[in-house]
Image: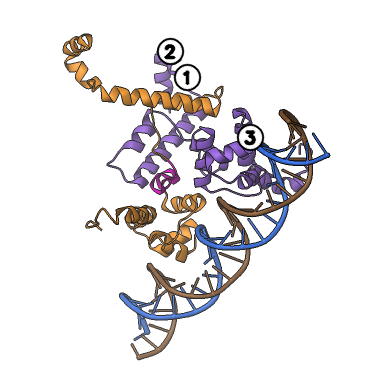
Chain colours: A orange, B purple, C blue, D brown
DNA sequence: GCTCTCCGCTTGCAGTTGCTAGCACTCGGG
DNA sequence: CCCGAGTGCTAGCAACTGCAAGCGGAGAGC
């Protein structure tokens, strides 16, 4: 698969996306050292279907992914992320607090998180020093800040 | 619905679960003040299907939920939680750090998070003083710790 | 009155999902 | 050798998902 030309890459990428969650499930299963039938029993999913999923022939629903995660004893979120139905969550005190706020509508939460993320991206692009470096070179960081 | 007996409650609860995501979508749509057809266009979902979803007649896939969330301009996670395919994430510095660690397997992450959560629950059950109070009564807190 | 646009819903159907029944293969024990 | 247990897979099918075509109703303009 490493030798794909640019021409077939779009089709292959779609196929890879489909296979990716299957390959990932197989990888986790191998890591857990259990057979396909054992996992299918633990997960409550038929073993032929699990086989088809692993080989990328079928696209499981979120509920099936949830069951598979339970069988693998990993978080369903990890599988969702791999399947492309969940983004890697932005973590940290601010997003956590925003998400937990009961006085904001869902839309307001999303607006705040979008703004927060855009600020974060903006700050990354300006390439400020990391907090650890500012502890060591506190004075020099302060100088460069005032120059900007 | 408030007068349901215990006998019909199990069936009604299942129906409510199915209707819950639909009712929630309708609620968000009403909040956003857009019609069903407008949302269906924004979301790229057929309007009859969206209607059926809102009335609980169909159970949409995660991909459709994702599209609806996009149309509503809210996070897909909010809809997933409501649909029961995602748990409310435990937030905070520790879970965030565990999830972001690239040197742990998914299973190890889940184990750590399970242990972390069980400790958190244990600490809630023992009703310890808050950190602010422990600063004031630091010595007494230390004594009760050594007794346990 | 009519026409048009928008509204939400019904119906039928193609494609997909998840299952059951069964297959071929491997390995170990008698 | 045979048998049993375990492995992963094929094929057929019922139920489900999501859509397009179309309906009846409401409101506005002529």
Q: Residues within 10 Å of mark 1 (few under 14, many from 20)?
A: few
Q: Residues within 10 Å of mark 3 (few under 14, many from 20)?
A: few
Reading the image, the residue beneath label 1 is: B129
- Give yes or no for contact between labels 2 and 1 (Cβ–Cβ under 8 Å): yes
Q: Is residue B144 visible?
A: yes
At x 50% / y 39%, what residue is drawn?
A: B87
The numbered mark 1 sits on a residue in which chain? B
- The percent position of residue A147, horizontal first and vertical second, equals 20, 10
| Element assignment for label 1 | loop
- The percent position of residue C4, horizontal first and vertical second, equals 68, 39
Among the two numbered marks 3 and 1 on one chain, the one whose residue lies closer to the N terminus? 3
User: Residue B147 versus residue A5: which sits nearer the camera?
Assistant: A5
At x 25% / y 57%, what residue is drawn?
A: A4
- Give yes or no for contact between labels 3 and 1 (Cβ–Cβ under 8 Å): no
At x 49% / y 63%, what residue is drawn?
A: A46
Q: Which residues are magenta?
A: A76-86
Reading the image, the residue beneath label 3 is: B35
Is residue A77 highlighted in magenta?
A: yes
- The percent position of residue A90, horizontal first and vertical second, equals 39, 32
| In front: label 2 or label 3 | 3
Distance from label 3 to label 1 (Cα)? 50 Å
Query: Eyeballing the image, is B81 above or below D15?
Result: above
Reading the image, the residue beneath label 2 is: B137
The numbered mark 2 sits on a residue in which chain? B
User: Residue B16 versus residue B37: which sits nearer the camera?
Assistant: B37
Q: Is residue B126 visible?
A: no
User: Residue A148 versus residue B34: which sits nearer the camera?
Assistant: B34
In the rendered picture of this protein, how many numbered marks are placed on residues? 3
Among the two numbered marks 2 and 1 on one chain, the one whose residue lies closer to the N terminus? 1
Location of the N terminus of chain B by quadrant is top right
């Amino acid at each position: 698969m490493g030798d794909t030309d640019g021409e077939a890459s779009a089709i292959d990428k779609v196929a890879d996306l489909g296979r990716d969650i299957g390959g990932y499930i197989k990888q986790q299963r191998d890591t857990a050292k259990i057979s396909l039938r054992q996992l299918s029993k633990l997960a409550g999913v038929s073993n032929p279907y699990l086989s088809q999923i692993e080989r990328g022939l079928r696209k499981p629903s979120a509920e099936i992914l949830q069951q598979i995660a339970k069988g693998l004893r990993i978080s369903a979120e990890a599988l969702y992320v791999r399947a492309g139905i969940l983004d890697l969550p932005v973590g940290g005190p601010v997003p956590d607090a925003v998400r937990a706020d009961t006085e904001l509508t869902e839309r307001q939460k999303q607006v705040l998180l979008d703004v927060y993320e855009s600020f974060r991206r903006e700050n990354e692009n300006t390439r400020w020093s990391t907090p650890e470096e500012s502890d060591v070179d506190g004075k020099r960081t302060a100088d460069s800040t005032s120059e900007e």
